[in-house]
Amino acid sequence: MKQAGIGVRMHSGWGALVAVANSTGTVEVIKRRRIALTIPGTPGASQPYHFAEKLKLAEAEKFLGDSFETAKRLALAAVQDVVDELRGRQYRVAGVAVLLASGRPLPPLAKILASHALIHAAEGEFFRRAFCEACERLGHPVTGFRERDLDECAHTTFDKTAARAGQQISTLGKSLGPPWTTDQKTAALAALIVLANPQR
């Protein structure tokens, strides 16, 4: 079977997923889709920490715990669906890449809920963690890349061909059509790095 790498850039409640292959130096997008980690119409689902801010601490903990299990279940189903489709096309997933923010550790919940900036940071981490845990449960290794370090990681991995790989990814939108925004481009590059370094 041929090898593929999966990359994802998460947002509040959803993520942009791209699966790529690299055949003789040519980047190929095998699959791209939007994955939903919330159930439409569920109160507070897309911004769980904003919703929990209005609750008592014990209620907030329960709400966030329940929301996390739902997000992980939906991520698990979405990843399994993508993996099954790739397998049907004779591709094996070599690894999964997730784009990260600054990576600073978060304080206890009470402090998070007291800070608007920390609420935003926690929500980003919430959905990334749900996606990562789903991948790991399915047996797919996950590598996190801080967005600000992605170009440096690409140069370390591809050396003199890094610029060419980046250019290929940047211009793929012309043949693929929309959406091909920063979401898809960074997810594709991260997936390409993982594909080149499966041991990561």
Image (cartoon, grey):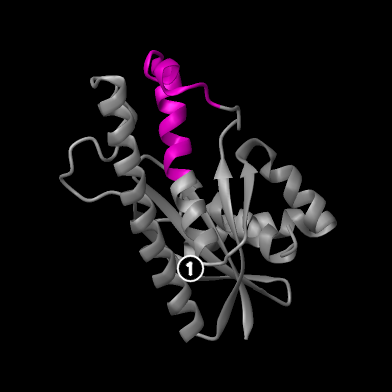
Which residue is painted at 24% across and 22% down in the image? 55
| Residue 118 in the image, given as x and y percentages of width and height | 45, 21
Which residue is painted at 75% across and 43% down in the image? 152
Report the quarter where the C terminus lies: bottom right
- The image shows a total of numbered marks equal to 1
| Residue 199 in the image, given as x and y percentages of width and height | 75, 62
**Amino acid residing under circle 1:** Ser
| Residue 76 in the image, given as x and y percentages of width and height | 40, 61
State the SS at label 1. helix
Q: Is residue 47 visible?
A: no
Q: Is residue 87 visible?
A: yes
In the displayed structure, does residue 176 sit left or right of residue 45?
A: right
Residue sitting at the far front: 58
Is 145 part of what is drawn in magenta? Answer: no
Is 92 situated above or below 138?
below
Q: Nearer the viewer, residue 100 or 59?
A: 59
Which residue is painted at 64% across and 45% down in the image? 145
In the displayed structure, does residue 168 sit left or right of residue 13?
A: right
**Mark 1, residue position:** 175
Which residue is painted at 81% across and 50% down in the image? 156
Q: Which residues are magenta?
A: 106-128
| Residue 59 in the image, given as x and y percentages of width and height | 26, 27
Is 115 part of what is drawn in magenta? Answer: yes
Is 168 situated above or below 31?
above
